[in-house]
Image (cartoon, helix red, strand yellow):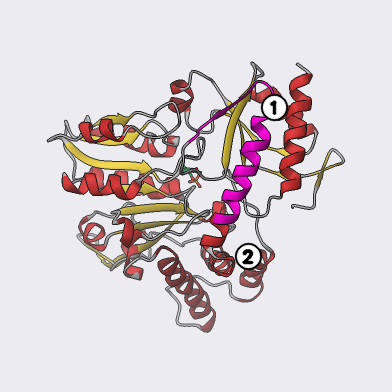
Amino acid sequence: MLNRAIDGKPLVYLDNAATSQTPECVVDAITQMYHGHKANVHRGVHTLSQEATDRVEATREKVRGFINAHSIEEVIFTRGTTEGINLVASSMGEMMCNGDEIIVTEMEHHSNIVPWQLLGQRKRIRLRVVPVRDDGTLDLDAYEDLFGDSTRFVSITHMSNVLGTVNPVKKMIEIAHRHNVPVLVDGAQAAPHMPIDVQDLDCDFYALSAHKMYGPTGVGVLYGKKSWLERMTPYQGGGEMISTVTFGHTTFAALPFKFEAGTPHFVGIAAFGAAIDYLNELGMSEIAAREHELLCYATQQLRAIPGMRIYGEAEDKGAVISFLVNDINSYDMGLLLDKLGFAVRTGHHCAQPLMARYGVTGMVRASLAFYNTHDEIERLAAAIARVSQMF
Ligand SMILES: *Cc1c(COP(=O)(O)O)cnc(C)c1O
């Protein structure tokens, strides 16, 4: 992928916040599953089924270690962050009543807004929103003021996919717990870029997507504290999640299987294990340090372009730069950059309320990964300058 050309120009891939590229070892793991170990998991006594099951469960243990969960019972495989949040909204929603309130932030991805709104339509639950300040950080005083007798849940992003802001989630969780309110952290952007420790954060739930972590598409993880998962009703019904079934009554399987109805994406889950090995080999702290250095260099290069406005200037920021130049439409900028070989994202980035907050309809976003280079950043800056002179 990274050696591809676009319109005869070498590809510069800067859309890592949408999805990351896939290392050879992960592609190999997918092929190996199809070539040698494809059988349905957790069912058969035959050797193939055992081999596939072993690979899925090996990944579960790798994920547990990667996020430092207490036990594998707390690691649920999903289709991605979106499904993880929907699972929690649906099951925790069963425990909520009319008039309850849920706190989210103004910088949430649509997948951490809409599931709560759908719940709100069923139960008249109200969303309370933590405002974003001009520099892209959250107003923590306003956050604390939102808590009241009706607050039942907090759902916040660890890192903004638009502003790059890394939120002080540990502190925010501590505040919520002081009010006896559980917290879900949307880790779709944070998990690929920094070490994650769910026990240190003390979050009640943590959702992530494998495809943004150099893993395959269609796989995600929901971490949940055992004490919550035991009390929650299943999200979907089907095979794998049951213990006994009669037409009169069904008992559910033990954790984590209670939340894994149907045949999972076992090929993808096995390959996700290879992605985690790959990340551990590079080292998450090393990745974070390398990307921080790339972010500083890119910020400095882009800031030098006349008419450049960068959105998101938090001290603690991941390697995402969203920007506009003069009054050039983000779509026009993206289209012309594509012609020059640059893959950047344009538009609302699944965060329309955040676009409204900044009074724009879209932004251009360059999101970096450890495999991006200084040379690519210099070429991006030159290309943006060239495009902006065309208007
Ligand atoms: C990508 C993303 C999501 C959704 O992830 P999916 O893989 O599409 O389910 C949620 N939140 C944030 C912050 C994201 O960047």
Gap in Å between the C-alphas at discs 2 and 1? Answer: 38 Å
Q: Quick one: which residue is furthest to the right in this view? A: 8
Looking at the image, which is closer to me, 42 or 206?
206
- Residue at 51 percent across and 64 percent down: it is 269
* Mark 2 closeness class: few <14, some 14–19, many ≥20 residues within 10 Å: many
Q: Residue 254 at x, y = what percent?
A: 28, 68
Relative to 315, does residue 45 appear above or below in the rendering? below
Q: Nearer the viewer, mark 2 or mark 1?
A: 1
Looking at the image, which is closer to me, 196 or 300?
300
Q: Residue 197 at x, y = what percent?
A: 38, 61
| Magenta segment, prevailing SS (helix, strand or loop) | helix
Could you tell which of marks 2 and 1 lies nearer the N-terminus?
2
Q: Amino acid at mark 2?
A: Val
* Range shown magenta: 289-313
Examine the image and state in which quarter residue 310 appears.
top right
Relative to 344, does residue 277 appear above or below in the rendering? below
Q: Does residue 63 appear in the picture of this structure?
A: yes
- Residue at 52 percent across and 35 percent down: it is 162
Residue 305's tag is 1
Residue at mark 2: 26
Q: Residue 119 at x, y = what percent?
A: 29, 36
- In which quadrant of the rendered image does the C terminus lie? top right
- Residue at 74 percent across and 44 percent down: it is 376
Secondary structure beneath dot 1 equals loop
Relative to 67, does residue 95 appear above or below in the rendering? above
Examine the image and state in which quarter residue 67 appears.
bottom left
Q: Amino acid at mark 1?
A: Ile
